[in-house]
Image: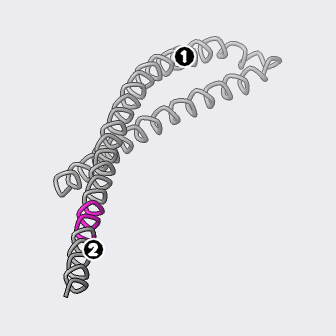
Amino acid sequence: MKGLDGMIRLSKWQLDEARKELAGVQAEMNEIDAQLAALSGQLEKEGAFEGDVLAGLSFGAFAAATFARRDALLKKRHGVEKQRNAKEDVVREAFQELKKFEILAERQALRQKEDAAKRETAMLDEMGIQRHHRDKERDKE
């Protein structure tokens, strides 16, 4: 049981570390999503200046730069999404490993309880048999 306790502790630690890494990747993904939303907001805000001639002249360059930044962010988001999927797999595997050891520990504890109950029953049976023999001997006398 002592060995399983150590393995359970190690598995919990590995699961916690994997979850922390997943949370970091998810935070990075959320940041990219926020940047994409901000770019869309900027594009809409700049597009609202339709009547202004100077704004119209510079809007094309601004829009092109914004689309380039958006494309770069989407590409980065795709890479981070792959990382997140990989981290989710690591978390899933670590959780399965932990559950495996916890189930083994539960089974081992149950087996120990059953063995203790059997030993106690055998001891009580032996005491009952001895008492019966003593009573039988006493009745003969």
Q: Are marks 1 and 2 in contact (CB under 8 Å)?
A: no
Q: Amino acid at mark 1?
A: Ala
Of marks 1 and 2, the one in the foreground: 2
Mark drawn on residue 65: 1
Q: Which residues are magenta?
A: 116-124
* Placement of 60 over or under 83, stated as above or below: above
Note whether 101 is above or below 69 in the view shown.
Answer: below
Rendered image coloring scheme: one colour
Q: Quadrant of the N terminus?
A: bottom left
Looking at the rendered structure, the secondary structure element under dot 1 is helix
Q: Residue furthest right?
A: 51
Give how far across and how far down residue 130 sits, in percent.
20, 75
Judged from this view, the residue extending furthest toward the left is 3
**In terms of image quadrants, where is residue 2?**
bottom left
Instruction: Please state the horizontal and vertical placement of residue 64, each as a whole percent of the image.
Output: 58, 12
**Most common SS among magenta residues:** helix
Rounded to the nearest whole Å, what is the CA distance between mark 1 and mark 2? 93 Å
In terms of depth relative to the viewer, which is nearer, 120 or 108? Answer: 120
| Lower position in the chain sequence, tag 1 or tag 2 | 1
Label 2: which residue? 128
SS at circle 2: helix
**Which residue is painted at 37% across and 45% down in the image?**
20
